[in-house]
Image (cartoon, grey):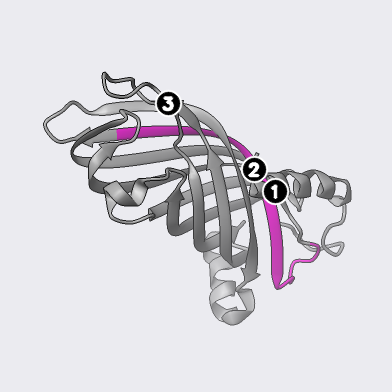
Amino acid sequence: MNLLTKFALTALFLALPVSAIAAAPGEEQPRWSVEVKYGLFYPDFNDWSTYYGSNHTWDVAGAVGYKVRRQVELGVEAGMMRDTGRGLAPTMNVVSGDVQYSLWPLNVYALYRAVFKEDQLIVPYAGGGWTRMFYQEKIQDQSTIKGSADGYHGRAGIQILLDNADITASNNLFKDFGIRHTYLVLEVEYSRVMTDTQATAASPSRSVNLGGTSYLGGLLFEF
């Protein structure tokens, strides 16, 4: 198991017993969160840069979570990564023509956010969960390959409270949309989703990880 995943899951379970600690009595606490993130995805595939010209591609994701307690959140996240290159189609294990390779991860997660008061400036968090990875390979002059595989992911990061950066804007967000808090989010996420390549006359089938490591930044809105 990846070190980041171990850290995230350990932090989650160690923190659960203290999740009863909450904000000061009388303060209303948010129940929902919406998050949008963008960053770089580094595939866990050794020769990626050889065939796609770089060792990374872009990653965009969005999530919706429900807070079963102030510190404990369950949610669903969907994302997308895409790259174009010339050479290898990863799940086919063959050299090909021009390739457009796309991934759509769907994550079901549990997170622990170490928030103990509503005006806390920095909030660390960690968690993880189940991942279903959908993939598609459009190969020049060949058929499109589609599929999916199951795995897991782990994540850790920090939230930086932005409410006091512009109090008027924060008040308007609450009045117009019910947004109680806005955070800048910085996150590292690792996913491991194993699948087997298609065997060919020149190469036997082998297992590859469709996942990898993402470095993300974005905004989190709590309602």
State whether the magenta stretch is mostly helix, strand or loop: strand
- SS for tag 3? loop
Q: Which residue is drawn at 53% across and 55% down?
A: 35
Q: Which residue is at the front of the view, 127 or 88?
A: 88
Rendered position, 118 above or below 96: below
In contact (CB < 8 Å): disc 2 and disc 1 = yes
Considering depth in this image, is 172 or 186 the residue closer to the camera?
186
Q: In percent of the image, x 75 and y 60: which residue is there?
A: 28
Q: Distance between the Cα atoms at labels 2 and 3?
A: 27 Å
Residue 128 is marked as 2
Question: What residue sits right under mark 1 in the picture?
Answer: 8
* Residue kind at label 1, given as amino acid type: Ala
Note whether residue 67 is visible.
Answer: no
Give the alpha-carbon distance from disc 3 to disc 1, as whole Å.
Answer: 29 Å
Q: Position of residue 133 (x, y in %)?
A: 45, 34
Q: Image check: 104 left or right of 31?
A: left
Residue at mark 3:
206
| Mark found first going from the N terminus, 2 or 3 | 2
Q: In which quarter of the image is residue 131?
A: top right
Decide: marks 3, 1 in contact (CB < 8 A)? Answer: no
